[in-house]
Amino acid sequence: MAKPVTITDVKTILTAPNDIRLVVVKVYTSEPGLCGVGCATFTQRALAVATAIDKYLRPFVMGRDVDRIEDIFQACNLSGYWRSGPVLNNALSGVDQALWDIKAKRAGMPLYQLFGGKCREAVPVYVHASGESFAQVEEAARAYMEQGFRYVRCQAAVPGYSTYGNRSMNSFAALNLSQTRTWEPTPYVTMVPDLFAHLRGALGAGVELLHDVHERIPAIQGVWLAKALEEYRLFFLEDLFAPEDVDYFRMVRQQTATPLAMGELFVNQAEYVPLIRERLIDFIRVHISDIGGLTPARKLAAFCEYMGIRTAFHGPGDVSPVGHAANMHLDLAIPNFGIQELSLFRDETREVFPGCPEVRDGCMWANDEPGLGIDVDERRAAMYPYPDHPTNGCWPEIRGLDGTIFRP
């Protein structure tokens, strides 16, 4: 019987090309030259994730058989007794994704083959168009459409306020806090239907439009907004409610057919179960590293398949290119794929992560190298240290005009 290949080291790599804090894990093995990479990025608490990996998971997995991915996942998940949470799940994801990378490399095939092979040739993606005015959003959307993108998330600024998805950074002057942003929900809720009336009139029906509420409004205003947007035929409306308010999805389902996406902030796959079981949403927005990696994400996607719900895995700039590659390989292999979010890779990022998925014709394409098909150049990664910041990347405070804190 062949001697098993075992884990000999786990290394955490912290890098910030484009000033985005990324956490990547590299797992080394007893087979010379064989290692795997995984994404563990939780930008707002990156150093806590690194500590969880270095001080807890690394000593726990040393010497284990790399083929026993499910067993290692279960053991790591239970090893802290109190389970779940974004810090521990991201740490676990880094190891989990790296083990899948290693398994596919040992098999000599791209990872999607181990998941059952391709269900599609490439992965359609959506990109982000924003602007200070409706005209600027339209211009940005048209530019993406000319590049072959057929799905565009559209966000516009609310005059006088810092609005999610737009670069405007208005501060809350009354508190004299430079990192605090001013926000009021009613002007935003009033503006959004007008934005999509403009975009549908200007862009026509040939482009799929998306929008992200980002949980920022009172739940009852979310019900009104979903109804108001129905006539503009969004591909989906995202994070209409906060995780604490998911019971409102039942109310929305009774009143409108606007497609709904939810789950970016969930950190336990069990949180999705009621929404999937009752078919209260249409897309799961999973940040794969936030639920622990590819091992639980595969199971969640399979559950959704039987309930007629599609995937829309989270893919902003604070998912590392390794995480984007993991998203892509799962996207390629599941029948109920819906859409993939993408933050376009800049030159600095491509230098740090050789093998970034190719993006063309509005899709991500696998390079068909064994494993995830991507690596991290540790020398170049070290050239982009985390930016110096007193709170190490915390999300800025969002406050109303009277100083009330809002969800981010």
Image (cartoon, rainbow, N blue to C red):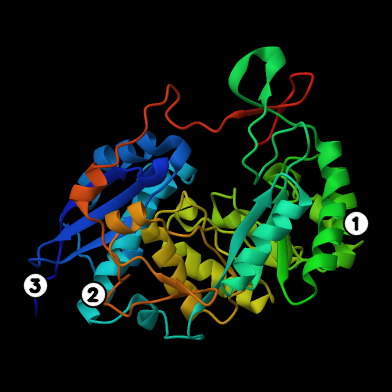
Q: Which residue is mark 3?
A: 3
Q: Which residue is mark 1?
A: 228
Q: Cα distance, mark 3 to mark 2?
A: 18 Å
Tell me, yes or no, whether the two marked residues, 1 and 2, touch with CB atoms within 8 Å: no
Q: Cα distance, mark 1 to mark 2?
A: 49 Å
Quick check: 101 left or right of 115?
Answer: left
Nearer to me, 72 or 88: 88
Q: Residue 45 at what x, y percent from top left?
A: 44, 36
Q: Residue 251 at what x, y percent from top left?
A: 88, 55
Q: Which mark is residue 163?
A: none
Q: Residue 28 at what x, y percent from top left?
A: 17, 58
Amino acid type, label 2: Lys
Q: Residue at x 76, y 45 (%)?
A: 245
Within-10-Å neighbours for mark 1: few <14, some 14–19, many 20+: some
Examine the rendered structure and indicate whether residue 53 appears above or below residue 329: above
Q: Earlier in the sequence, mark 3 or mark 2?
A: 3
Within-10-Å neighbours for mark 2: few <14, some 14–19, many 20+: many
Quick check: 173 left or right of 27?
Answer: right
User: Is label 3 in a helix, a strand or a loop?
Assistant: loop
Q: Residue at x 67, y 66 (%)?
A: 142
Quadrant (top left, top right, bottom left, bottom right) of the C terminus: top right
Q: Which residue is mark 2?
A: 105
State which mark lies toward you, 1 or 2: 1
User: Is label 1 in a helix, a strand or a loop?
Assistant: helix
How many marks the image carries: the answer is 3
State which mark lies toward you, 3 or 2: 2
Within-10-Å neighbours for mark 3: few <14, some 14–19, many 20+: few
